């Protein structure tokens, strides 16, 4: 069994060694070029690029599943595998993990066996278990002993900021916060401020 973590964020989806934009677009037919394309149950999806909307839940449509398959395929390809049993680790926002945990588990249990193609190569994945972790905390859990008596973990995402106080090595879940702010929000606000002041568009290339 292989342990693989997949963090489906608003801006990017991350695996242990891979990263793609969280945009998903369903195509009406097989594309002429299969780069960053997932084929699943007879349908084709392109992944990567910017997400067009912000979802209230990661389980409200098939985007999370498609992005998860894309990351799993890329990780297995690096291991020279096309079939594997997976122990899947995923992340949810700090303040929503309690409310969304069961929905996420149900969502993935409906898709325990995944037969799909990534960029034309076939993969078969058996998801034996799903472990859910709070976003931000998972990134520092191995470093807690090096922290002082009080530390604040701030996870800056594309559209959200997760804030988690840690006291004596233990997460203070009663005082954690998830804010609907992020890097993209800041960029948009800066661009608008400059637009109003100078009357010109900012070149962000």
Image (cartoon, rainbow, N blue to C red):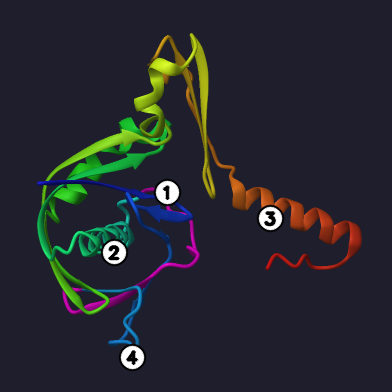
Q: Earlier in the sequence, mark 3 or mark 1?
A: 1
Q: Which residue is mark 1?
A: 56
* Closer to us: 17 or 93: 17
Q: Residues within 10 Å of mark 2 (few under 14, many from 20)?
A: many
Residue 149 drawn above or below residue 151: above
> Which corner quadrant of the image does residue 91 belong to?
top left
Spatial separation of the CA atoms under disc 2 and disc 3: 29 Å
Q: Residue at x 42, y 48 (%)?
A: 56
Quadrant of the image for the C terminus?
bottom right
Q: Which mark is residue 32?
A: 4
Spatial separation of the CA atoms under disc 2 and disc 1: 22 Å
Q: For the residues carrying marks 4 and 1, which lies nearer the camera in this image?
A: 4
x%, y% of residue 93? 41, 37
Q: Which mark is residue 102?
A: none
Q: Visible in this render: residue 171?
A: no
Spatial separation of the CA atoms under disc 2 and disc 4: 18 Å
Q: Earlier in the sequence, mark 2 or mark 1?
A: 1
Q: Is residue 80 left or right of residue 143?
A: left
Which region shows up in magenta? 40-57
Q: Residue at x 70, y 65 (%)?
A: 204
Q: Earlier in the sequence, mark 2 or mark 4?
A: 4
Outermost residue to the bottom: 32
Q: Earlier in the sequence, mark 2 or mark 3?
A: 2
Q: Which residue is mark 2?
A: 70
Q: Which residue is mark 3?
A: 188
Q: Main secondary structure of the magenta part?
A: loop
Which SS class for mark 4? Answer: loop
């Amino acid at each position: 069994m292989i342990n693989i973590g997949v963090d489906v964020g608003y801006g990017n989806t991350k695996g242990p060694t891979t990263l793609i934009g969280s945009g998903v677009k369903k195509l009406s037919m097989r594309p002429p070029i299969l780069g960053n394309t997932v084929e699943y149950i007879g349908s084709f999806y392109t992944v990567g690029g910017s997400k067009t909307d912000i979802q209230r839940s990661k389980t409200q449509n098939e985007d999370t599943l498609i992005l998860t398959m894309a990351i799993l395929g890329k990780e297995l390809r690096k291991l020279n595998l096309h079939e594997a049993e997976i122990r899947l680790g995923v992340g949810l926002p700090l303040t929503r993990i309690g409310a969304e945990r069961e929905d996420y588990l149900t969502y993935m249990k409906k898709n325990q066996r995944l037969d799909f193609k990534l960029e034309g190569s076939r993969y078969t994945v058996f998801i034996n278990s799903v472990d859910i972790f709070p976003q931000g905390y998972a990134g520092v859990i191995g470093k807690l002993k090096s922290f002082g008596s009080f530390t604040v973990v701030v996870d800056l995402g594309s559209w959200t900021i997760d804030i988690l106080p840690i006291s004596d090595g233990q997460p203070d879940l009663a005082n954690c916060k998830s804010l609907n702010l992020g890097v993209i929000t800041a960029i948009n606000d800066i661009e608008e401020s400059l637009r109003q002041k100078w009357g010109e568009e900012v070149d962000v290339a």
